[in-house]
Every structure is written in C-alpha cells, then in structure tokens.
Image (cartoon, rainbow, N blue to C red):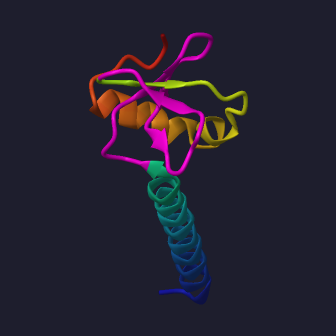
Amino acid sequence: MLPEEVKHRRLLRFFGIAFALVILIYLGAFVRKFEIFSGPVRDDKHGWLGPVIRGDLHTVDIGKVYYYEGTSFSSYQMFRPLCATWLWVNGVGGKG
C-alpha cells in the first residue's frame, strides 16, 4: 500500500472508533437515565414520551402507563431518538 492510503485508513479507523464510542456512551446514558423495563409515559400536550425517568417525582402511575406531570421535558428531548425507538419496540405510537 502507498503511505497515503495507510494514513487515510488510520484516520478512517480513528473516526470510526470515536463514533462508536460516542454512540456507546449515549446508549449508556440512556439506560442510566431511564427505567427501560417500565411502562410508557404520556403527556396530554406532548403525547407519548418514552420510558420512566429514574427517580422522577413528576411521573404518576395511572394503570398500565404513566402520566408525566412535570414541566421540564429536557431529558425526553435529549434522548428523543432513543425514546422514539423504545416506544416503537414497545408497540406504542410515537406521537399522541
């Protein structure tokens, strides 16, 4: 191989590993923040949000699902792709 090709492959490998590491950290943060084996959470204005946030005092159990009474949706917004995937896997529609 030419030295230039080796440099490109090393650079591509470095960015691939960095990207995979960021994805793994994001997934780990999602699992740490949410109860992934809980029921889905719903809000009247925002629809289905995702799983229950660990230790959250604003989530109320209303039967098979939970209702979110809080005003801050930042955790659900930060993890929107994973929450939507979690809702899809659990058979719940993404939008109310």
Measured as percent of width and height from the top left, residue 38 is found at 34, 40
> Left or right: where does residue 11 sit relative to residue 51?
right
Residue range corresponding to the magenta coloring: 35-63
Measured as percent of width and height from the top left, residue 51 is found at 43, 37
> Left or right: where does residue 36 sit relative to residue 75?
left
Vertical side of 21 occupied by 88: above or below:
above
> Left or right: where does residue 58 sit relative to residue 32?
right
Q: Looking at the rendering, which quadrant does residue 6 occupy?
A: bottom right
Number of marks drawn: 0
In terms of depth relative to the viewer, which is nearer, 90 or 2?
90
Q: Which residue sits at x=41%, y=48%?
A: 35
Q: Which residue sits at x=57%, y=71%?
A: 18
Q: Is residue 64 magenta?
A: no
Measured as percent of width and height from the top left, residue 14 is found at 57, 77
Measured as percent of width and height from the top left, residue 88 is found at 34, 28
Vertical side of 38 occupied by 84: above or below:
above
Q: Is residue 60 magenta?
A: yes
In terms of depth relative to the viewer, which is nearer, 32 or 5?
32
